[in-house]
Amino acid sequence: MFQTRILLFATVSLTLSCGAAFASYEEAYPMLQRGDFAKALPLLNDAAEKNDARAMNALAILNRDGSGVVKSEKLAAQWFERAAALGNLGAMNGLTSIYAMGSTEVPKDLLKARDWAWKAASANDPSGQFNFYQLAIQNELSRLDAVGRINNEKYMTLAKRPLIERDLDQKAYTMLSRAAEQGHLGALNVVNAVLSDNVGQTNAQRKLDILDKLPAGRLPAQIEQTNQQGKKNYLYLKSLGQTYVTVGIFRDGLQSALITAGLEAKTQNLTCDLKTNRITKIQVSRDMTSPQYLPVAATLLKDALLVKGEWQEIWTINYCGVDINVPMEFQADGGGGAYFQSKFDQKNR
């Protein structure tokens, strides 16, 4: 979900020409913390008149939330604009939120929202970086339908684009990665999800590394449970050997591999209880051919979003007590997934 609330009274280092402005804001700050808005307001107004961006940002938040004043998104936007013009990162994120959500006073404007998010992101602010990613992925780069399910038509339209048409993708995932690298909890969790949804040469291990970085007890219980299950799934994949696929593709591919192994078993007159058949090993038998990754300019997602590439893996199925090697051919689909097909291994005949 888009981040709609900014940390109250976030500050940015400023060089002010008037010490009194500092004094007014510093006096007001403890009042704000204890909710004594009536006493804080005149001090904030005084500091704002002396060009203190922190006071302007605080006044914007009070107007946005209706704390000690009549709620006004319009006035909030005006104060945020003044503070943002002076470089206040909290105000830039506040404007991002106001324009992204929209109201009766301030019409929704996604271009303005993303522009302010980009300004905060470019100043290396993790909230701005994460907001920029969210605005891109929820709008132009959205693959979902009205009820939140994958829309195949949207997916394929985005997946078929050449790299030259993926500038927004590159910026969005670069900013997501940078926010996560600065410890932004939401960004870390989304990077974890992105790695879960994308095939790649090192993505499985990267996901396990990210899961180890996520602090316990800081995320909602349902997300914590999902992450723990994800960790178990990827540790299981790791125990089988080397693979470039996601857990989802593994599950789909395993059904195909079992069928292919069954057809191979028929030629060897093997019969048994089908429930006993299982996969025992995976190995990459032909490495990635000319892999092409989205050029993310940040560490966590660098060479993680595969656009083009083909490879082969051997999935060993223990079928009726006999190991049958099933070659699995994979081709990146351009959207994070991969097409696959299983084949008979002539050496087993």
Image (cartoon, rainbow, N blue to C red):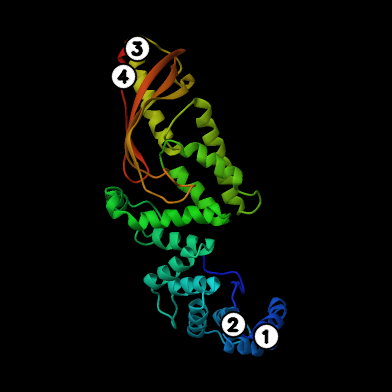
**What residue would you read off at disc 3?**
348
Label 2 vs label 3: CA separation? 77 Å
User: Element under label 2?
Assistant: loop
**In the rendered image, the vertical position of residue 186 relative to residue 78, given as above or below:** above
**For discs 3 and 1, the disc positioned in front in the rendered view:** 1
Q: Is residue 153 visible?
A: no
Whether residues under marks 3 and 4 lie with C-beta atoms below 8 angstroms apart, the answer is: yes
Disc 4 from disc 2: Cα separation = 72 Å
Residue 157 image offset from top left, x and y in percent: 27, 52
Residue type of the residue flagged with mark 1: Ser
Q: Residue at x 31, y 19 (%)?
A: 344
For discs 4 and 1, the disc positioned in front in the rendered view: 1
Q: Nearer the viewer, residue 249 or 331?
A: 331
Q: Residues within 10 Å of mark 4 (few under 14, many from 20)?
A: some
Alpha-carbon neighbours of circle 3 within 10 Å: few (<14), some, or many (≥20)? few
48 or 36: nearer the viewer: 48
Residue 303 falls in which quadrant of the image?
top left
Residues at marks 4 and 1, CA–CA distance in whole angstroms: 78 Å
Residue underneath mark 4: 344
* Residue that carries the numbered disc 1 in the rendered image: 24
Residue named by callout 2: 52
Residue 348 drawn at (x, y percent): 34, 12
